[in-house]
Amino acid sequence: MSNFSGQIRASSSLMRRLRQRLSDPARLLQVRFFTTTEGSRPTIVHKRSLDILHDPWFNKGTAFSMTERDRLDLRGLLPPNVMSTEQQIERFMADLKRLEQQARDGPSDPYALAKWRILNRLHDRNETMYYKVLIANIKEYAPIVYTPTVGLVCQNYGGLFRRPRGMYFSAADRGEMMSMVYNWPAEQVDMIVVTDGSRILGLGDLGVQGIGIAIGKLDLYVAAAGINPQRVLPVMIDVGTNNEKLLKDPLYLGLQQHRLDGDEYITVIDEFMEAVFSRWPHVIVQFEDFQSKWAFKLLQRYRNTYRMFNDDVQGTAGVAIAGLLGAVRAQGRSMIDFPKQKIVVAGAGSAGIGVLNAARKTMARMLGDTETAFDSARSQFWVVDAKGLITEERQNIDPEAQPFARKVKEVNRQGLGEGASLVEVVREVKPDVLLGLSAVGGLFSKEVLEAMKSSTSTRPAIFAMSNPTKNAECTAEEAFSIVGENIIFASGSPFKDVDLGNGHIGHCNQGNNMYLFPGIGLGTLLSGSRIISDGMLQAAAECLAAYMTEEEVLKGVIYPSISSIRDITKEVAAAVVKEAIEEDLAEGYRDMDARELGRLSQEEIVEYVENNMWIPEYPTLVYKDH
């Protein structure tokens, strides 16, 4: 009898333990290995009725079920027909097609801006549906929410501003930022994109209107990397503007004063960084569109202390490296031959120098990672800025460009000198790659492209990487028609493929930062790495370069289609996680500690990444009083 009652006691304690496990969602997650918490559980909300319908994070519009309408006091506030997500999207897309033309504010309002306006209205009322539409049509809408249309949005932001999105920290908030961060409603923020508006794309100083770029980038973090939209924060640091037009505009939304400089400027950025990392110690901060003079200084200042990176310096560099390695593959050679490439770089701003440093490190790594290898890699680059070829004779040379200044004897032997023009350099060097990061539209003139015909490469590469489209150094059509069909062409903004006749296509590869930065951010988040190392950035670039098949690269396709961006991001993030583990930087994420991370195989890392990507599905909402 006692044995029987012992069994009953044991079985009831087992039932109790099971009940506890099932009632504790955190424990339940441990049972379902690696299962994401993103959107897979009911969401507790503290609002009802019209408050829910006015909250884009929780609003489902006509998709609220009848039981939810009862639970949340919505019965009678919505039309009676409960619609599926598919029906909602169908209705929105029909509306979009109808409104695209009508939403234009006269003939001067570009078609793309009308599309942006309509998408933005959806974003304002229903985030889940907005991201569902964006992911399903990413190829069509990425150029609307991001480059090139985002440039137009920033230029016109004063007139487009409807409801606040993100946070604004200004020079007038000094001493208050630590308390200001608590005004943001999210308890956890995973990603911040911050700009000071000083160099938006190639459009110059747009002051407070630069917030548009931070919003656009974070849309891609959600769409491509599956970062939960409730955990992203666009930030504008307004330290004034040197744009005289904005200073005189009575409707300008920012501080109407000249930009802070020197120590005053750094004090504001320091206070911001301290504030956000105090509230959210695990956040990742991406610096975006800071003018060159500050981009490098701030990167060096913070990169070993905080989880941060600069997309213009490091993201652009990674995408360019992936393209350069792809160009080597397209010549039918192995990526290991990259250190033999002769590269002429037009532009020595933050993007140009970032690419030069990354390309040099990549070459040195392939040559054995010694000091000699690093030194010899330098001689593969010829850098031309607004004043011409940079040599050691240059007066007041930018310290960042100094390592790439050519020796005078060297260039004299080639019949070149300090300040030689781009066309002269291309003619004499006969480069394998002509890389444009100048933000000067049309810089690759007919003469420059004619000179590329004498390249010693079997398949020369022309990279016109400046954004937006009007700043591209040349168009795809110009490159193919002047240099010939046997080239590799890549640009920063999208161009259509070129019909070369006889059934041949000149592929236009878009070397867009969106291939890398979402994966770098996601991989850093999921590895729990304390910093973002050069090795992690290199792993991301090499993963992107290897993503294309042999058959594709030989056809001249060196970047994948934007339509597979979520898959690309998953692979890039997995490569970043793996590198963080190898460099002993990973500290784990949520229930996955560093030790468990270290035990995962390559396939399991990819699965772990995929399971932690947010998917835009409506969660079941449960109301709970505060």
Image (spheres, rainbow, N blue to C red):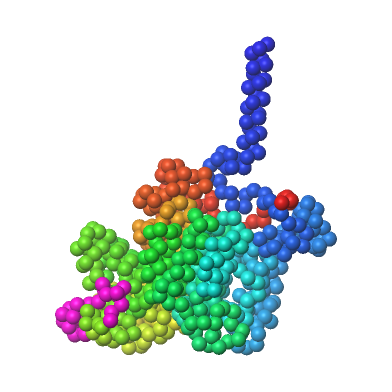
Q: Left or right of 251: which side holds 301?
A: left
Which sits in the foreground, 143 or 252?
252
- Residue range of the region highlighted in magenta in the rendering: 396-417
User: Would residue 5 be seen by someone viewing this image from the given angle?
Assistant: yes
Q: Left or right of 342: which side holds 466?
A: right
Residue shown at 64% from the left, 68% from the top = 123
Tell how many labels.
Answer: 0
Quadrant housing residue 165: bottom right
| 555 w.r.t. 605: above or below | below
Q: Residue furthest front?
A: 175
Q: Quadrant of the N terminus?
A: top right
Quadrant housing residue 294: bottom left
Residue shown at 27% from the left, 77% from the top = 382
Which sits in the foreground, 158 or 570?
158
Q: Left or right of 610: which side holds 95?
A: right
Residue shown at 64% from the left, 37% from the top = 22
Residue 456 counted in the magenta span = no
Q: Percent from the top left, x then y, of residue 462?
A: 36, 77
Q: Left or right of 425: which side holds 303?
A: right
